[in-house]
C-alpha cells in the first residue's frame, strides 16, 4: 500500500485557484466616491422632494382657507355687510365646524381699511388693527399665502411659525374686495409631515444605494484584481514566458488514474499540466496556471493540454488500455462558445471517439454565468463528451443545477473524503451525495483517497470511482504505461487490471 502523502493538485488546469491580491487603494477610493455619490444624491433629492412637499402642504392650506371663505363664510357675511348686521353666532358655528378638518388657530375677517369685522376671538371685533402683509396682498384681489414667524398684527394671536392665508371676498358683479378672510394655522404639523416623508425617502434611497453598491461589488473586486494584474511586473513576465513555453512545447502533462470501486479496473485518467521551465525546472501548476487562466492564454493553454492529453490517450489505447482522459476547464473556457468545435477538431486529429474525453469544471466556474455555461456544456454533451463537476460540495451548485445541467459525474472534494472514516459529518455528506447522484443517474468519484480504510468505506456506500495517492501519483505517460502493467489495489475492491479493448 502506497504511503500517505499530501493532497494532489486538482483545480482548473491542475491547481486550485489561489487568493488574488486586491488594490486596496482602488477599493477605498471607489468606496469613498460611491458613498459620497449616494449621500449627495440622497441630499439633493431630499431637498427637491422636501421643497415640493412644502409647496403641496401650503397649497392644501390655501385651498382649505379658500373653501372656507368662499363657500361657507361669503354667503353669510356679504349680505350681512350690506345690512350692517354681522351674524357672529352663525360665523362662530361655521368656524367651529371647519376647524377640526382645516386645522386653523385664528380666523379674522377684516374690511378694506383693516377693521376687524369678525374674529373667533370676539375681543378683537370692531378693533382697528390695520392690514397685515398677507391681508394687504389679498385686498388687491389675489389669495395670498405666507409662512411667517410669530404674530404679524394685532388681530393675529397665533404663536410660533405659522401659515397665514388671506382670501379676498367681493360682492357679486364687483371686482373690488369687500372683506378679507385671514386664517392662521401652525406650521409645525407641516414640518412634521415633511420631515417624516423626507426621512422615509432617505432610507429608501440609502437602501437602494446599498443594494446597487452590493451588486457592483463583485465587478469592483474583479476590476481591482485586473488592475493588480496589469501592474504586476512579475506576472507580466510570467505570462510572456508561458507564451514562449507554449510555442516551444515546454509544457507536459502528467496523468493520475481513476479506479472503479466495483471491479477495480482503471476507469480513466485525469490530465494535470506541468511546465518544464528551461531555467526553473519542473513547475507545478500553481506557479503558472492562475496567471494563464486570468488572461488571454486561457484558451491556448486549455487546447494545448487537451491536444497532449488526447495524444497520450491514443498511445495507451493502442496498447490495449481502454480508458479515457479528463481535462480541467476554467471559468473562461466554459463561457467560450468556440470550445466544442476546438475539442471536436482535436478528437478528429487523433482519431478518437468523443466518449474518451471528459471535462471537469468547478462549481464556481458555472456560477460565473450559468446561462452561457449551460449552453456550452449542452454542446459538449451533444458531442458525446463526459462532463464532471469537480470539487463538488465546496462551491455554488444547487440541486436545481444538477437537475438541469448535463452532468455525468460528481467528484466529491477531498476535504470531505479525507475525514470520511473519522468524522461522522463528512461521512454523512459523502453518503448523501452518493445517494442523490445515483438517483439522478450521475456517477460519483471520490478525490484525495490516501488509505485502504477510506477505499473500503467508499466501496461500502456505493461510490463508483476513486482517485488519489493511494492508487498513484500524477505521472508522465511513460511511467503511467509501466504502472498500468501491474495491479495496484488489493481485494478491497478487486485487483486493478488494465481494462482492455
Image: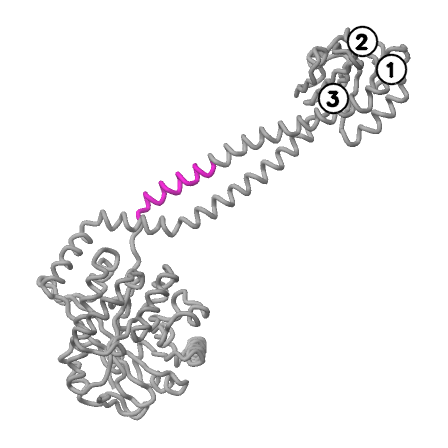
Q: Secondary structure at mark 1?
A: helix
Q: Residues within 10 Å of mark 2 (few under 14, many from 20)?
A: some
Task: Examine the residues drawn in magenta and state their main secondary structure.
Answer: helix
Residue 221 coordinates in the image, percent (x, y): 35, 50
Give the SS element for disc 3: strand
**In contact (CB < 8 Å): disc 2 and disc 3:** no
Question: Which residue is at the front of the view, 36 or 87?
Answer: 87
The residue singled out by tag 2 in the image is: 115
Q: Position of residue 207 (x, y in %)?
A: 51, 45
Q: Is residue 399 visible?
A: yes
Label drawn at residue 184:
3
Residue lying at 76% horizontally and 29% vertically, measured from the top left = 102
Q: Nearer the viewer, residue 406 or 257?
A: 406
Name the quadrant of the C terminus: bottom left
Read off the magenta span: 23-39
Name which quarter of the figure residue 106 lies in: top right
Q: Quadrant of the N terminus?
A: bottom left
Q: Earlier in the sequence, mark 1 or mark 3?
A: 1
Q: Nearer the viewer, mark 1 or mark 3?
A: 1
Q: CA distance from mark 1 to mark 2?
A: 18 Å
**Residue 292 magenta-highlighted:** no
**Residue 290, quarter of the rendered image:** bottom left
Query: Mark 1 sits on what residue?
Result: 79
The residues bearing labels 2 and 3 have C-alpha atoms spaced at a distance of: 17 Å
Amino acid at each position: 500500500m502506497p504511503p500517505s502523502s499530501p493532497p494532489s493538485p486538482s483545480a482548473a488546469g491542475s491547481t486550485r485557484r489561489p487568493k488574488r491580491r486586491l488594490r486596496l487603494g482602488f477599493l477605498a477610493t471607489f468606496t469613498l466616491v460611491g458613498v459620497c455619490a449616494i449621500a449627495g444624491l440622497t441630499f439633493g433629492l431630499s431637498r427637491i422632494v422636501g421643497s415640493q412637499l412644502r409647496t403641496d402642504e401650503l397649497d392644501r392650506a390655501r385651498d382649505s382657507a379658500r373653501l372656507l371663505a368662499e363657500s361657507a363664510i361669503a354667503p353669510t357675511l356679504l349680505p350681512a355687510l350690506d345690512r350692517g348686521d354681522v351674524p357672529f353666532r352663525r360665523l362662530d358655528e361655521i368656524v367651529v365646524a371647519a376647524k377640526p378638518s382645516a386645522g386653523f388657530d385664528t380666523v379674522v375677517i377684516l374690511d378694506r381699511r383693516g377693521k376687524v369685522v369678525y374674529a373667533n376671538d370676539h375681543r378683537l371685533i370692531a378693533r382697528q388693527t390695520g392690514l397685515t402683509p398677507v391681508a394687504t396682498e389679498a385686498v388687491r384681489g389675489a389669495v395670498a399665502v405666507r409662512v411667517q414667524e410669530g404674530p404679524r398684527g394685532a388681530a393675529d394671536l397665533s404663536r410660533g411659525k405659522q401659515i397665514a392665508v388671506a382670501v379676498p371676498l367681493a360682492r357679486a358683479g364687483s371686482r373690488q374686495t369687500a372683506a378679507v378672510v385671514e386664517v392662521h394655522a401652525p406650521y409645525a404639523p407641516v414640518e412634521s409631515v415633511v420631515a417624516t416623508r423626507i426621512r422615509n425617502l432617505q432610507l429608501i434611497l440609502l437602501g437602494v444605494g446599498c443594494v446597487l453598491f452590493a451588486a457592483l461589488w463583485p465587478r469592483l473586486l474583479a476590476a481591482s484584481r485586473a488592475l493588480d494584474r496589469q501592474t504586476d511586473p512579475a506576472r507580466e513576465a510570467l505570462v510572456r514566458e508561458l507564451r514562449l513555453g507554449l510555442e516551444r512545447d515546454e509544457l507536459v502533462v502528467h496523468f493520475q488514474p481513476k479506479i472503479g470501486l466495483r471491479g477495480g479496473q482503471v476507469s480513466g485518467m485525469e490530465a494535470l499540466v506541468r511546465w518544464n521551465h528551461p531555467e526553473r525546472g519542473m513547475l507545478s501548476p500553481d506557479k503558472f496556471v492562475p496567471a494563464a487562466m486570468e488572461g488571454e492564454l486561457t484558451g491556448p493553454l486549455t487546447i494545448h493540454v487537451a491536444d497532449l492529453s488526447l495524444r497520450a490517450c491514443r498511445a495507451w489505447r493502442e496498447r490495449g488500455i481502454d480508458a479515457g482522459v479528463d481535462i480541467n476547464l476554467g471559468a473562461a473556457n466554459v463561457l467560450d462558445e468556440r470550445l466544442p468545435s476546438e475539442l471536436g477538431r482535436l478528437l478528429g486529429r487523433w482519431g478518437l471517439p468523443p466518449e474518451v474525453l471528459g471535462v471537469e469544471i468547478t462549481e464556481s466556474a458555472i456560477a460565473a454565468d450559468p446561462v452561457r455555461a449551460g449552453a456550452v456544456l449542452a454542446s459538449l454533451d451533444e458531442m458525446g463528451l463526459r462532463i464532471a463537476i469537480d470539487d463538488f460540495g465546496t462551491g455554488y451548485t444547487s440541486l436545481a443545477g444538477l437537475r438541469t445541467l448535463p452532468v455525468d459525474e460528481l467528484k466529491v472534494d477531498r476535504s470531505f473524503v479525507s475525514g470520511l472514516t473519522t468524522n461522522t459529518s463528512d461521512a454523512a455528506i459523502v453518503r448523501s451525495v452518493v445517494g442523490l447522484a445515483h438517483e439522478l443517474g450521475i456517477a460519483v468519484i471520490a478525490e484525495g483517497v490516501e488509505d485502504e480504510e477510506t477505499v473500503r468505506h467508499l466501496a461500502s456506500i456505493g461510490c463508483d470511482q476513486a482517485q488519489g495517492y493511494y492508487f498513484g501519483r500524477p505521472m508522465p505517460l511513460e511511467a503511467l504505461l509501466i504502472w498500468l502493467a501491474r495491479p495496484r489495489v488489493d481485494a478491497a475492491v478487486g485487483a486493478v487490471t488494465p481494462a482492455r479493448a
